Amino acid sequence: MKTLYLTTSKEDIEQAAKIIREGGLVAFPTETVYGLGANAFDEEAVAKVYEAKGRPSDNPMIVHIARASDIGQLTRLLNPDIVELIDNFWPGPLTLVVKKRPEIPDRTTGGLDTVAVRLPESQAARDLINAACCPIAAPSANLSGSPSPTRAGDVAADMDGRIDAIIQGEDCRIGIESTVVDMTGDVPTILRPGIITAEAIGAAIGKAVKYDEFLTEGSRHVQLDPAAGVDEDDFAPKSPGMKYRHYAPKADMLIVEGERQKVKAEIERLKNLNRQYGNKVGVILFEERAFIEAAHDFFAQLRDLDGEGVDLILAGALSETDGVGFAVMNRMLKSAGYNIVRV
Ligand code: AMP
Ligand code: MG
C-alpha cells in the first residue's frame, strides 16, 4: 500500500477525513502522541488498525471526539464526576473509561462493556474528527511494542506502506500518552498515569482517586518479570494494554535508580565498562525534577538512540514517585522491561 503524506491544511484534512469515512486508516498528530485513526463505528476499519500495528486484539482503543457533547454517542451514563472531569480537563490529555453504548463494535473496545473516550486539545486532531463526522478510534501510531511516536518522522518510520495516510503535523507538545481513569467503579481509578495527575483529578471531583493496583510499586515486578512466577492467565489488569511489553527500544536498556550523584557516577562507570567490551552505549539522563521535559523528550530519545544503532541504553530514574515523574517512570520501566539497578 502506498501511504499518502498530508499536511494540516484544510484541503488535506478533508482528504484524510474522506479516507476515514471510507474505512481507511490515517495517522494524525495529537498533543500527547501521534494516533492511528479509524472510524470507531466501522468494525472492519478498526480491525485494520490492529493489523497495521501488529496489536493484540484484546487491547482496546481510545475513541476520540471533537466536541464534549459527542460523548453521548458513546455512553448513555454520565454521572456528576464524569461531567466534572469533562468540564475541568477537556479538551486535553485525560481519557475517561465509561460504560459503553451497545452500538459500539466489540472490536473497538476489545470486547469490554466499557469505552475509553478523549477529546484532544490538538486542533489538527479535532479538525480531522469534525471533518470525518464520526468518532475516531485511535491507539498510538507505532508498531505494537515499540516506543510511541511523538514526531511525524517516527510515524513514517513505523507505518509507511501499512496505512493509507499520515498527517504530518508538529511534534507532540506533551510527548507521553493521556492519563486513563476508569469512571465505572465506586472510586475513580487511574489505569495509566499521565500529565494530569491523580491529585489534580481528585481535587476536581473532591474525592479520593486511586491507582490501579497493577501500577503501584508492590506489584511492579509482577507485570513483566517472568521469574516472579506469575501465570499469564492470573494477570487480568483492568486496562488490557498493561500486560503487554511496551515502548521497547531495539537496544537493551537498564535504569539506574538512586541518589542523583551516585546515579550519574554509576551510569558513567557502566558506560565505560560496556564500551571497553565493544558495546555502543547511549545515555538518557534528564535534569533533576525536569518532569515535563522528560515527558516531552523520552520517547523521542529512545527512537533517536535506536537510530544511532546503540546496543545499550542507560537511563537515570526520575526521583518523583507520583505526579508527572511517576507517569514518565511508568514508561521508562516498561521500555526497560523492568530492568533496574539501585545504587
Ligand atoms: P493506546 O491506544 O496505545 O494509547 O492505549 C490505550 C490504553 O487505554 C491501553 O492501555 C488500553 O488498554 C486502555 N483502554 C482503552 N479502552 C479501555 C477500556 N474500555 N477499559 C480500560 N482500559 C482501556
Ligand atoms: Mg500505545
Image: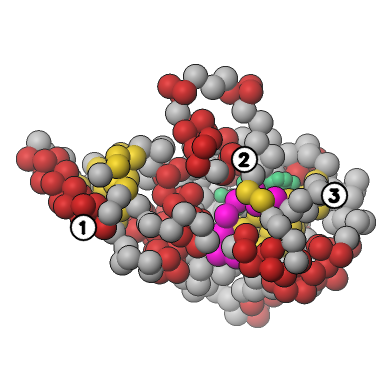
Mark 2 Cα shell of 10 Å, populated few (<14), some (14-19), many (≥20): some
In the figure, is residue 9 to the left or right of 108? left
* Residue at disc 3, secondary structure: strand
- Which label number is shown at residue 213? 2
In which quadrant is the C terminus drawn?
Answer: top left
334 falls in the magenta region: no
Please name whichever residue, 235 or 199, is drawn nearer the observer in this view of the structure. Answer: 199
In the figure, is residue 258 to the left or right of 338? left
* Mark whose residue sits in front, 3 or 1: 1
* Residue at disc 1, secondary structure: helix
In the figure, is residue 291 to the left or right of 179? left
The spot of residue 1 in percent (x, y) is 56, 49
Q: Residue at label 1?
A: 261
What type is the residue that disc 1 sits on? Answer: Gln
**In the image, which residues are magenta?**
189-196
Q: Residue at label 3?
A: 99
